[in-house]
Amino acid sequence: MSIIRRLSITLLLMSVTVVTYAQMIEDPATWTYEVKKKSGNDYQLIFHCNLKSGWHIWSLHPGGDGYEIAPSFTLDKNDNVKLKGTPTEKGKATTTAMDGIDGKITYLAGKIDYIQEVTVTGKTTIKGKHEYQVCNDRMCLPPKDKDFVFEIK
């Protein structure tokens, strides 16, 4: 067998090992959900994220080279719910250069809140999905999707 073929097989096996290892790691993000009434029919849908030490999540506006997967929040169609603006984030943000990424990037660690303002008419249930990716100083885990439910009473 040629050296190029051996090298190709070795690189392929190493890639599969890294991907398999990343999929075996338990999700370091814990999510909880809260509804906060602002006034009248205006509410905040709050996505609380708590990350284990050593892990970070990309900002809603991460910068960088465009390969960073920013959190996204998709609400199922509901005629009783009108979005007000786009989600915002609260938490300890870090903006820095990072090896292997072109341009400065922004990420958050620890406890982070993502807030979506809505106007709601009547009692309703708001359902949807959010997608996010978490990383540490060695690797990023594959993106995850989570379902969410908010009850407006």
Image (cartoon, rainbow, N blue to C red):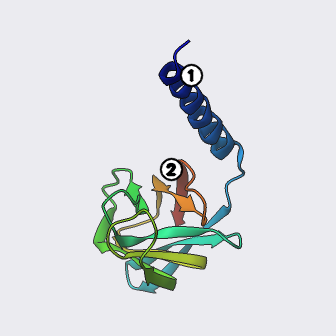
The image position of residue 91, as x and y in percent, is 53, 84
**What's the amino acid at mark 1?**
Arg
Is 114 displayed left or right of 79 in the figure?
Answer: right
Sequence-wise first label, 1 or 2: 1
Query: What residue sits 35% from the left and 68% below the top?
Result: 121
At label 2, counting other C-alpha atoms closer than 10 Å, the crowd grade (few under 14, some 14-19, many 20 or more) is few
Q: How far, Cα to Cα, is label 1 from label 2?
A: 32 Å
Q: Foreground: 34 or 81?
A: 34
Q: Which of marks 1 and 2 is in front?
A: 1
Q: Foreground: 93 or 91?
A: 93
**What's the amino acid at mark 2?**
Pro
Residue ID for mark 2:
143
Q: Foreground: 152 or 34?
A: 34
Identify the disc placed on residue 6: 1
Disc tally is: 2
Compared with residue 76, is residue 54 higher up or lower down, i.e. above or below? Answer: below
Which quadrant does the N terminus fall into? top right
